[in-house]
Image: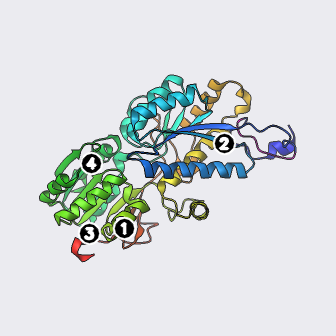
């Protein structure tokens, strides 16, 4: 191999070879990356944003002179059973080289036995602790776990003298994990739990839930839910007329769609998020502005997560010295798995580092609040540009 090729930045080793004058005549192998996308159903918007980030990373990889990525996707309809069926197809029929998991924790729980059976490593957005309590060897999380989602919010509640909390959540893996963490942490934060209840997936109305919360009259309301339900819940709570002193929702209010749907009614809502372009992670502003140039909208944490997923897979493959096992798919997967399990890597999301269960341990969360028409970073305090707007404004004051 020429010195020029050796010097070239490589990705996926034999899978992703740099183009150089010495290698330009060599046929470039296309890398097959498989995943499902929730093109329909509950996770449609968030999943679309994630895959846009993956595509953006793949384009950057090609621009750097690496092999092209063939992204093979199927619509899992936001259904766990459908996702499991499609990952079997990606592995056994499409013969993909690499995998990224489906959007939600419930879907990952269905897909994980498939990748375990085929001994195929997969990185995932899933952050519900239950995913990492099953002994899976091939599932690696990129997001801060859901059970610590509200720790910082409850610290703020204590600092502002609040004494009671109501916890509500959709009865599925991620929202339930948010609730579980809040429930366990509340007493240590000086908060008594005055309501703790769930609602089923696909619930047609959240009005009864909102009414029960309003009757409990908590200082703080914590909701574990996805985007569509988060929007419906705020509308239902407004209809009761009750305004708690703080209202926090897991993840969804950090997305622009939340504010677009609610307008002034989003004001004061707090959320945790896995990424902010103002979060001082190297490359965040560059990614955000380039993404906006391509898609005419700034990215949220889902798009950043998709880009980071690509970076993490790329880093694992770079470190795996795959040239030595280029014709052995199981050996390739074994080396990539080893790196995903042990490497410490700075991605667009922050530090990637997992424990022996595959649970993410390296990165921190941000806390944002809708203040007027803007999402304002209010924690961590050392990088926050705004202060908490307290108390939550009454519905008639908007």
Q: In which quarter of the image is residue 321?
A: top right
Number of residues whose C-alpha sits closer than 10 Å to that of mark 1, classed few (under 14), some (14–19) or many (20 or more): many
Q: Which residue does the numbered mark 3 point to in the structure image?
A: 392
Element carrying mark 2: strand
- Look at discs 2 and 1 and give the one toward the viewer: 2
Q: Does the magenta segment cover residue 94?
A: no
Number of residues whose C-alpha sits closer than 10 Å to that of mark 3, classed few (under 14), some (14–19) or many (20 or more): some
What's the magenta bit mostly, secondary-structure-wise?
Answer: loop
Q: Magenta span covers which residues?
A: 15-21
Please state if 268 lies on the left or on the right of 347 as rendered: left
* Relative to 331, residue 124 above or below: below
Q: Which residue does the numbered mark 1 point to in the structure image?
A: 370
Please state if 9 lies on the left or on the right of 154 as rendered: right
- Look at discs 4 and 2 and give the one toward the viewer: 2
In terms of depth relative to the viewer, which is nearer, 394 or 359?
Answer: 394
Where, quadrant-wise, is the C terminus in this rendering? bottom left
Q: Which residue is drawn at 70% across and 36% down?
A: 15
């Amino acid at each position: 191999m020429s010195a020029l090729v050796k010097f070239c930045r490589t990705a996926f080793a034999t899978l992703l070879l740099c183009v150089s004058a010495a290698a330009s005549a060599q046929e470039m192998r296309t890398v097959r990356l498989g995943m499902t996308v929730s093109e329909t159903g509950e996770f449609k918007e968030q999943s679309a944003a994630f895959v846009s980030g993956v595509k953006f990373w793949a384009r950057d990889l090609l621009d750097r002179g690496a092999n092209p990525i063939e992204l093979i996707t199927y619509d899992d309809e936001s259904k766990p059973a459908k996702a499991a069926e499609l990952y079997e197809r990606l592995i056994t029929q499409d013969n993909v080289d690499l995998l990224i998991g489906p959007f939600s924790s419930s879907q990952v729980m269905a897909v994980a036995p498939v990748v375990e059976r085929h001994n195929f490593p997969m990185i995932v957005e899933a952050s519900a602790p239950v995913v990492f309590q099953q002994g899976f060897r091939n599932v690696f999380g990129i997001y801060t776990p859901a059970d610590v989602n509200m720790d910082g919010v409850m610290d703020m509640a204590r600092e502002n003298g609040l004494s009671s909390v109501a916890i509500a959540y959709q009865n599925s893996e991620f929202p339930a994990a948010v609730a579980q963490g809040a429930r366990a942490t509340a007493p240590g934060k000086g908060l008594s739990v005055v309501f703790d209840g769930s609602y089923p997936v696909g619930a047609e109305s959240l009005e009864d839930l909102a009414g029960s919360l309003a009757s409990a009259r908590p200082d703080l309301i914590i909701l574990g839910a996805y985007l569509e339900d988060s929007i419906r819940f705020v509308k239902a709570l407004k209809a009761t007329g009750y305004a708690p002193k703080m209202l926090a929702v897991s993840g969804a209010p950090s997305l622009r769609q939340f504010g677009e749907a609610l307008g002034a009614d989003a004001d004061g809502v707090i959320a945790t998020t896995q990424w902010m372009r103002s979060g001082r992670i190297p490359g965040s502003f560059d990614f955000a502005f380039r993404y906006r140039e391509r898609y005419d909208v700034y990215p949220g944490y889902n798009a950043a997560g998709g880009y980071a997923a690509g970076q993490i897979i790329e880093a694992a493959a770079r470190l795996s010295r795959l040239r030595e096992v280029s014709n052995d798919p199981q050996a390739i997967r074994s080396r990539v798995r080893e790196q995903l399990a042990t490497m410490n890597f700075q991605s667009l999301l922050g530090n990637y580092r997992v424990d022996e269960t595959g649970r993410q341990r390296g990165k921190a969360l941000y806390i944002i609040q809708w203040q007027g028409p803007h999402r304002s970073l209010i924690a961590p305090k050392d990088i926050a540009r705004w202060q908490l707007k307290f108390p939550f404004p009454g519905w008639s004051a908007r």
